[in-house]
Amino acid sequence: MQHNSAQSASPEGSAVTSRTRPGAPRTQNRPRVLVVEDERDIADLIKHTLERGGDIDVEIAYSGDAALKAAAERPPEVILLDLNLPAVSGLEVCRLLRSRPATRHVPIIMLTARSTESDRVVGLDAGADDYVTKPFSTRELAARVRAVLRRRRDEPEAPAVYRGQHLMADFDAVNITVDGESIRLTRREFELLRYLVDNRNRVLSRDRLLERVWGYERFIETRSVDVHVGRLRSKLKAAGRQIETVVGLGYRFVE
């Protein structure tokens, strides 16, 4: 029986599994997605949905510790991370993944039953790139994952170096400084800044930012763009003033 949305199930176990669907032998040419979910029914449903097309391999970790070990041994292309894990929480797993060089820039989509804006902001603060609220459509989740993979595959060359009055951004070296002080950005904040700088003095709509930075043409709320822009401005301090809000249209990075 096929399902269109994920439902709750009883959590058990903490092992990691990387079973592939029948008839689809594992290949290094296919991208890997790490699903971190302690509820086996939900994890298996996500795995089945993503592997149905035969172009993605899925590994499941049923606990935070297992996820950290799996990601360290072989960093995946995308991580789907449940917020409500036993023992080590999803937020802590996210923070630890972001603190490690091998997984610092791996896209993380957080799965959560919490739907308030403050809960979503907490997840973004921890380093998540996006969030999906339970119960969710597995088709929508698969579309988001594929959009992220497509964007990573088609990602253009980053601009080399930008030097402004306050901001110096070496995108190749992943080095951002403001008035000589090193600034630490999440992967999404970094990509947002890079796209704004690369298109400086141009007005960019929220929908365009979603498409080019997030890789989504739909599904995600434009409010997520506003949250990320606000956080980016704050981190950039004096240079944050270069990101202007164009009322009714979007944002613009000005020189």
Image (cartoon, helix red, strand yellow):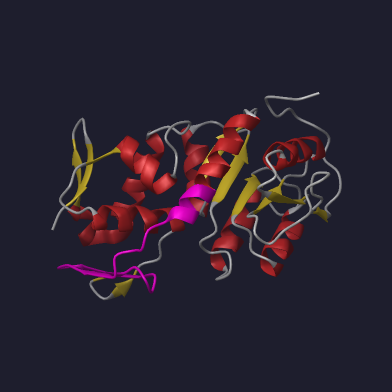
The mark total stands at 0
Q: List x then y, in percent, for residue 72.
A: 67, 67
Q: Would you say residue 157 sits in the magenta stretch? A: yes
Magenta residues, as a range?
149-177
Q: List x then y, in percent, for residue 3.
A: 73, 25
Relative vertical location of residue 12 with respect to residue 188 in this rendering, above or below = above
Would residue 222 appear left or right of 75 to someone viewing this image?
Answer: left
Picture quarter containing residue 182? bottom left
**Is residue 47 or residue 92 the one in the foreground?**
47
Give the residue at the far front of this rendering: 23
Would residue 12 appear left or right of 126 to someone viewing this image?
Answer: right
**Is residue 206 or residue 182 the one in the foreground?**
206
Would residue 56 appear left or right of 252 to someone viewing this image?
Answer: right
**In the image, what residue occupies the spot 64% across and 64% down?**
75
Picture quarter containing residue 99? bottom right
Q: Would you say residue 82 sits in the magenta stretch? A: no
**In the image, what residue occupies the spot 64% across and 44% down?**
83
**In the image, what residue occupies the spot 83% across and 52% down?**
14
Q: Is residue 227 visible?
A: no
The C terminus is located in which quarter? bottom left
